[in-house]
Image (tube, rainbow, N blue to C red):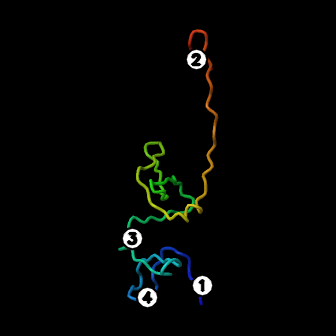
């Protein structure tokens, strides 16, 4: 048996079962009932995240993972209030972002109540 390609979005290069050549499909190579092709007309809210894209991981009340895609708006990083559900197995493939941390400055108050730097 030939090895199946990885799960992902593909364009058919020939007609395949009732799917015409040149059609965008999602190929899923595992699960129940097994490998299959899914057409975009049936996808709901799917989004593809490119490698090394900055995302915010969150969870809903049921514990389902949600990715939020921050945007640069007016010189600030804005995190939207709506995200995209992802499969729990995909969380393990996320890479934590390393961010420099600085300790907050502690200011001492002078005898007259003014801040001394």
54 to the left or right of 82: right
Q: What SS does tag 2 mark?
A: strand
Q: Are marks 4 and 3 in contact (CB under 8 Å)?
A: no
What residue would you read off at disc 1? Answer: 3
Nearer-N-terminus badge (2/3): 3
Q: What SS does tag 1 mark?
A: loop
| The C terminus: image quadrant | top right
Spatial separation of the CA atoms under disc 4 and disc 3: 19 Å
Spatial separation of the CA atoms under disc 2 and disc 3: 58 Å
Query: x, y (%) of residue 81?
Result: 41, 49
Which of discs 1 and 4 lies nearer the camera? The answer is 1
Query: Mark 4, residues whose alpha carbon is within 10 Å: few (<14), some, or many (≥20)?
Result: few
Name the foreground residue: 32 vs 21.
32
3 to the left or right of 21: right
Nearer-N-terminus badge (1/4): 1
Spatial separation of the CA atoms under disc 1 and disc 3: 26 Å
Query: x, y (%) of residue 57?
Result: 52, 54
Name the foreground residue: 24 vs 67.
67
What residue would you read off at disc 4? Answer: 16
What residue would you read off at disc 2? Answer: 115
What residue would you read off at disc 3? Answer: 43
């Amino acid at each position: 048996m030939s090895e199946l390609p990885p799960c992902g979005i593909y364009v058919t290069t020939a007609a395949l079962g009732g799917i015409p050549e040149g059609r965008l499909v999602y190929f899923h190579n595992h699960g129940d009932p097994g490998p299959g092709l899914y057409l975009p007309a049936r996808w709901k809210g799917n989004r593809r995240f490119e490698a090394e894209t900055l995302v915010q991981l969150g969870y809903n009340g049921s514990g389902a993972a949600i990715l939020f895609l921050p945007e640069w708006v007016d010189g600030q990083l804005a995190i939207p209030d709506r995200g995209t559900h992802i499969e729990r197995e995909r969380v393990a493939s996320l890479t934590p972002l390393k961010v420099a941390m600085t300790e907050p400055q502690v200011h001492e108050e002078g005898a007259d109540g003014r801040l001394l730097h």
